[in-house]
Image (cartoon, helix red, strand yellow):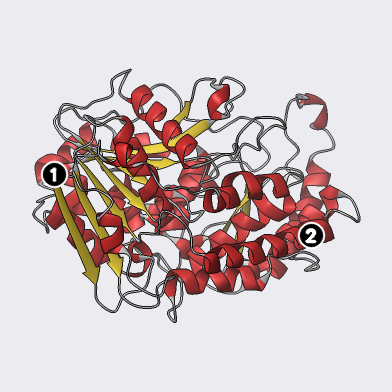
């Protein structure tokens, strides 16, 4: 539902109207999108399973009932980095009750993040995708979101991770009167060290080797199917890539499985499986690292808002803490605060979410621990919070399920059972579809060719609603889902065990 088309601007590598279309989600104190998603992720999954996997009807939201910004509250714009979707990177902060009850939260996926497609750059474009273009994209998005204005009466804050902190600085320099604060977590240097450049060069070479290996034999369709479901293991993301970034983000600690799995699949699909994966990798990933340049002193002097820099103190990507160096870039800022989270690795929003949320709330002078009041709950019901969430695009609901109920998302361990179920379903479909093919429109997408959602549903007897971000087991009948999930028990024949449902995607 919330997809916003940026205007054509060839200087910013937007060569056609709508070529760059940003995905975003909004949460307000009376419509807390992410709090609701966290507490009702199983219902979002149920809404996906209720859809017919063979339907050709798009599942886009109907009507113009998307969440609108509340003029009584300031805005926090969330900017991801490190190839994450904004929901994966900031899931805890977006669902934080204190922030959700005091701010309009705008979760934005820039180019190549989440549900926003990357746009390979045409030849002879004259420039590369860099931090200045990324900042200009975000500013155009804000202006469109605010109906043409560059300011918001209650103020705008930016929470940015890693490289997006440098993007936020460029935004604040371009619009000096627009932003109340920039909050940078997991900071990186303005210019990358030679060691990091060499490391990224090694990653680039590994990805190029994987791409060439995949795209020099067999049919694209067959290879894509085999690789996507791991049937023959002919092409996988190089383990060194995953291990290298895992160490960069978490040091000696492990990354949550659903996040590392999401990133591996995203990189594989966009950088290896896609026929233009090499161009995409260069255009929206590596160039951002290699083409980084310091901002001019004149530009930095324009930044006068409050500045917060938060970093960990162990297993960092550099040989030192760099928070103080980043803070020193803003000599004319109204207020500068540097916080260090003890015994924490680089990626705080994922590895130390509670500590980061606490620092943010203190910086914004928000009192923690505020729960939704009965009045707020009644307002949510009155405004149709549930109905609005279930009218999100199917891929948006699936993104939220992946973030707030990762145990429901099928992993490679389920592939063998999924294949057996697929074979049974295909036999049934062949028998039932003999007389119905003539009624199909030519514009329908063949479910066998389309990307699919894959959900794992484990039968555990009487399923109860589980509060919090994870749900380990729910059930379903093979044919449909009513309300929530129908609880079942027994052998595989009556529905227990891992059941993998594949549903046609509509956007990616």
Q: Which residue was labeled with disc 2?
A: 226
- 231, 125: nearer the viewer: 125
Identify whether 215 is placed above or below 136.
below
Q: Residue 340 sits in which quadrant?
A: bottom left
Query: Is residue 112 depicted above or below 251 in this figure?
Result: above
User: What is the crowding at mark 1: few (fewer than 14 residues within 10 Å), some, or many (at least 20)?
Assistant: few
Q: Is residue 395 left or right of residue 53?
A: left
Residue 440 placed where, x, y %? 76, 27
The residue positioned 40% from the left and 73% from the top of the image is 316
Query: Residue 309, relative to residue 385: is it above or below?
Result: below
Residue nearer the viewer, 278 or 199: 199
Q: Residue 32, percent across and down?
A: 26, 43
User: Which sits in the foreground, 85 or 399?
Assistant: 85
Q: Of circles 1 and 2, which is in front?
A: 1
Q: Which numbered disc, 1 or 2, marks the residue that appears first in the sequence? A: 2
- Secondary structure, mark 1, is loop
* Res. 321 visible in picture: yes
Q: How many marks?
A: 2
> What residue did someone put label 1 on?
334
Outermost residue, bottom side: 252
Q: Quadrant of the N terminus?
A: top left
Which of 462/449 is in front? 449
Q: Position of residue 278 (x, y in %)?
A: 72, 49
Spatial CA span between label 1 and label 2: 55 Å
Q: Secondary structure at mark 2?
A: helix
Q: Residue at x 45, y 25 (%)?
A: 62
Q: State which quarter of the image contains the C terminus.
A: top right
Q: On the picture, is 234 further left or further right than 3?
A: right
């Amino acid at each position: 539902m919330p997809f916003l088309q940026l205007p054509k601007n060839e200087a910013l590598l937007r060569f056609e109207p709508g070529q760059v279309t940003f995905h975003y989600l909004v949460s307000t104190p009376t419509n807390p999108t992410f709090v609701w998603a966290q507490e009702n992720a199983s219902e979002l999954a149920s809404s996906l399973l209720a859809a017919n996997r063979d339907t050709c009807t798009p599942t886009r939201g109907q009507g113009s009932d998307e969440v609108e910004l509340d003029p009584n509250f300031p805005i926090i714009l969330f900017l991801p980095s490190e190839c994450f979707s904004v929901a994966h990177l900031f899931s805890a902060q977006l669902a934080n009750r204190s922030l959700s009850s005091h701010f309009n939260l705008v979760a934005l996926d820039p180019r190549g993040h989440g549900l926003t497609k990357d746009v390979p750059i045409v030849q002879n474009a004259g420039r590369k995708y860099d931090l200045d273009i990324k900042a200009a994209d975000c500013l155009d998005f804000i202006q469109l979101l605010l109906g043409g204005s560059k300011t918001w009466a209650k103020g705008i804050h930016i929470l940015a991770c890693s490289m997006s902190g440098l993007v936020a600085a460029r935004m604040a320099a371009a619009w000096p009167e627009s932003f109340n604060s920039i909050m940078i977590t997991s900071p990186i240097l303005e210019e990358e060290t030679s060691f990091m450049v060499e490391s990224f060069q090694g990653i680039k070479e590994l990805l190029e080797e994987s791409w060439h290996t995949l795209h020099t034999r067999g049919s694209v369709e067959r290879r894509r199917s085999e690789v996507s479901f791991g049937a023959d293991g002919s092409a996988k993301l190089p383990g060194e890539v995953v291990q290298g970034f895992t160490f960069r983000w978490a040091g000696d600690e492990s990354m949550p499985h659903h996040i590392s799995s999401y990133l591996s699949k995203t990189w594989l699909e966009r950088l290896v499986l896609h026929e233009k994966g090499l161009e995409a990798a260069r255009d929206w990933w590596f160039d951002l690292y290699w083409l980084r340049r310091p901002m001019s002193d004149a530009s930095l002097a324009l930044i006068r808002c409050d500045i917060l820099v938060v970093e960990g103190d162990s297993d960092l990507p550099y040989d030192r803490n760099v928070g103080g160096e980043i803070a020193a870039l803003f000599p004319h800022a109204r207020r500068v605060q540097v916080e260090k989270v003890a015994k924490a690795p680089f990626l705080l929003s994922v590895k130390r979410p509670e500590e980061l949320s606490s620092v943010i709330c203190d910086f914004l002078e928000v009192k923690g621990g505020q729960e939704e009041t009965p009045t707020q709950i009644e307002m949510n019901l009155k405004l149709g919070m549930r109905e609005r969430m279930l009218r999100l695009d199917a891929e948006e609901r699936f993104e939220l399920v992946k973030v707030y109920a990762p145990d429901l998302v099928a992993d490679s361990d389920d592939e063998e059972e999924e294949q057996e179920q697929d074979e049974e379903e295909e036999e049934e479909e062949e028998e039932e579809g003999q007389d119905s093919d003539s009624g199909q429109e030519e514009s329908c997408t063949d479910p066998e060719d389309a990307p699919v959602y894959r959900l794992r549903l484990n039968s555990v007897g009487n399923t109860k609603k589980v509060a919090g971000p994870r749900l380990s087991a729910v059930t379903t009948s093979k044919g449909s889902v009513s309300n929530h999930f129908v609880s079942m028990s027994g052998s595989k024949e009556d529905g227990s065990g891992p059941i993998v449902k594949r549903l046609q995607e509509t956007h990616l």
